[in-house]
Amino acid sequence: MLNIILMGPPGAGKGTHAVWIAKDFNIPHISTGDMFREAMASGSELGNKIKEVVNSGNLVSDELTCALVKDRLSQPDCANGYLLDGFPRTIPQAEAFKKMGEEIGRGVNLVLNIGCPDEILIQRIAGRRVCPQCGASFNVNTMKPKVEGICDECGHELIQRKDDNAESFKVRLANYYKSTAPLLDFYKEQGLLADFDGNSEAATLKAELTALLEAKK
Ligand code: AMP
């Protein structure tokens, strides 16, 4: 069973690799960032509440985030594994998640960490374009879609995320180092962490990830 957390700084390639991992290993891709963006796009109460926080690059409260994840992980499609992308992002979230995983019998058994140097992340974020429909990621410099501005996967128009600007990125990166990076030790101590180089070719990284996932599934 693959109960996976995908970690890494913003722009490391979590979204890109999450899409094929979910497909190839037949597990749901649960991205808290996508869930929050969907809530904002739908204009729901939750969406309006978190809009400013998300667009400025800050973190949504642990309480709201954990409630959302608990609800999603309790769905039947998570019974045979899951891929969490963007959660947990703080030590309190990781602790709450450990408890909820035990409660619902769906604890994490593998943490994939995609590392990447800051200067590469900054370049990638500036060129990133995403599909608001299926979540696929592209880059105007390094990973161009076949047709400019159009998603290869589903044909929807690509957009630039509101928080993919220099100012919000700075906040997101600072939050990553302050609140999220300490989780690497938390999972290392539990023997769950596997490190990967997000600066290597996408195909190389895919092959390395596939080898580990095949061995663990
Ligand atoms: P992402 O798509 O993972 O980069 O997330 C986009 C934004 O959603 C983040 O910058 C946060 O504002 C919010 N967000 C996503 N996941 C979390 C989380 N686990 N905890 C708090 N805020 C989150």
Image (tube, grey):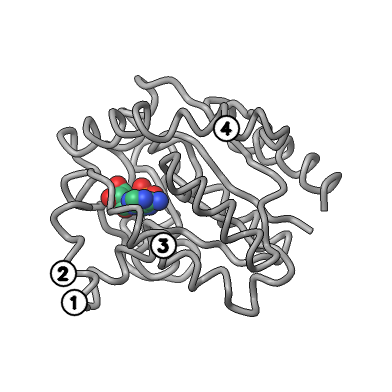
Q: Is residue 7 above or below residue 154?
A: above
Q: Amino acid at mark 1?
A: Gly
Measured in 3D between alpha carbons, the distance from the residue under mark 3 to the one under mark 4, in whole angstroms, is 37 Å
Q: Considering only order in the chain, which callout, 4 or 1, is on the residue closer to the N terminus?
A: 1
Measured in 3D between alpha carbons, the distance from the residue under mark 1 to the one under mark 3, in whole angstroms, is 24 Å
Q: Amino acid at mark 4?
A: Phe
Residue to which mark 3 is pinned: 151
Q: Residues within 10 Å of mark 2 (few under 14, many from 20)?
A: some
Which quadrant holds residue 57? top left
Instruction: Please give the label number shown on residue 186.
Output: 4
Left or right for 141, reference 187? left
Task: Give the image location of residue 5, x and y in percent.
Answer: 59, 48
> In this rendering, which labeled residue sits more in front, label 2 or label 1?
2
Q: Residues within 10 Å of mark 1 (few under 14, many from 20)?
A: few
Q: Amino acid at mark 2?
A: Asn
Left or right for 26, reference 72? right
Q: Is residue 188 above or below residue 105?
A: above
Task: Give the image location of residue 182, x and y in percent.
Answer: 47, 28
Q: Is residue 156 above or below residue 118?
A: below
Q: Are marks 2 and 1 in contact (CB under 8 Å)?
A: yes
